[in-house]
Amino acid sequence: MGAIKCIGILTSGGDAPGMNAAIRAVTRSAIYNGLQVKGIYRGYRGLVTGEIKEFKSQNVSNIIQQGGTILKTARCQEFMTPEGRKLAYENMKAENIDALVIIGGDGSLTGARIFAQEFDVPCIGLPGTIDNDLYGTDTTIGYDTALNTIIDAVDKIRDTATSHERLFFVEVMGRDAGFLALNGAIASGAEAAIIPEFNTEVDQLEEFIKNGFRKSKNSSIVIVAESEVTGGAMHYAERVKNEYPQYDVRVTILGHLQRGGSPTAHDRILASRLGAAAIDAIMEDQRNVMIGIENDEVVYIPFSKAIKNDKPIKRDLVNVLKELSI
Ligand code: F6P
């Protein structure tokens, strides 16, 4: 196993339900395997400022069911500079931390990759983001919970949409990835999803209007992935108001409530499995890989692949939504 005796763990980027279950799993699995564990607070910022505390098994008691992250999280500008990363390395050494486990999304793993290259520090990444946009894992920690939050909300919106015979645009998260919007639409029986992957390919609003809008339904729900490029749900609602004034249009933006809540069974199990696998990877002298689960098997994906490769949207899901919304 080399000289690894102590690991540091941090959560970074947007929080996701199940991060606490992952912290618990990494901590307990490390202790089980004779390693010391240190919790690093506020993501990379805590590494830069030295907000680090030893974790025993009790520190992670009673958290598997909690949303958010007990380690807090942040998006740290300082860690993006060479000076910030040098400070982080010095703090790591001062705390005798030999390896890091980073739970986060794309940006967090990119930070880990650069840090590992600069200072030869073993880093293991766990995919933690509601967006599900990391290549090399079927799902990411938090995605299933967020999806369930979306369908709960859309079920409620449908009651009022039907009663008033309205067209609702419901905006969900995932600025660069349409997994939440597309699968949220299928699971809630929505009429269409507007997702970033197809923004440049087709006019998705026109498609929806052509294929579904004029049907005999008295109400419709379209799930829109948030987007700074298009302007998201507001933009599409404005377009319909201008081009089809006969329709009664409303917008609901679900926002950050999608990031909260108690993790589903799926996310708790995923996080527990990935957390334990992170320690297995460290014991096997693996470094600079993200742990994923593909086809129910644990896999190690080099950071370069997990970050650079786009996780594709399955076209058959697009067809399912289209066929079932007739
Ligand atoms: O990456 C997770 C995510 O929730 C995205 O879906 C969303 O676009 C973004 O974070 C929001 O970030 P913030 O919490 O900084 O507003």
Image (cartoon, rainbow, N blue to C red):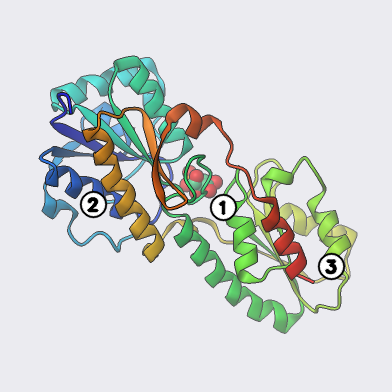
Q: Secondary structure at mark 3?
A: helix
Outermost residue to the bottom: 163
Question: Taking 65 as reference, is 35 left or right?
Answer: left
Q: Which mark is residue 213?
A: 3
* Label at residue 286: none
> What's the residue at 32%, 27% (across, down)?
287
Q: Which residue is mark 2?
A: 24
SS for dot 2: helix
At numbered mark 1, what does the secondary structure look like: helix, strand or loop?
loop
Residue pointed to by mark 1: 173
Above or below, 3 against 73 in this view is: above
- The residue under the point 13% across, 47% down is 32
Hey, what amino acid is under mark 1? Met
Distance between the alpha carbons at the discs numbered 1 and 2: 26 Å
Q: Is mark 1 within 8 Å of ligand 1?
A: yes
Residue 111, position as x, y percentages in the image: 40, 28
Image location of residue 81, percent across then percent down: 40, 19
Q: CA distance from mark 3 to mark 1?
A: 24 Å
Q: Amino acid at mark 2?
A: Arg
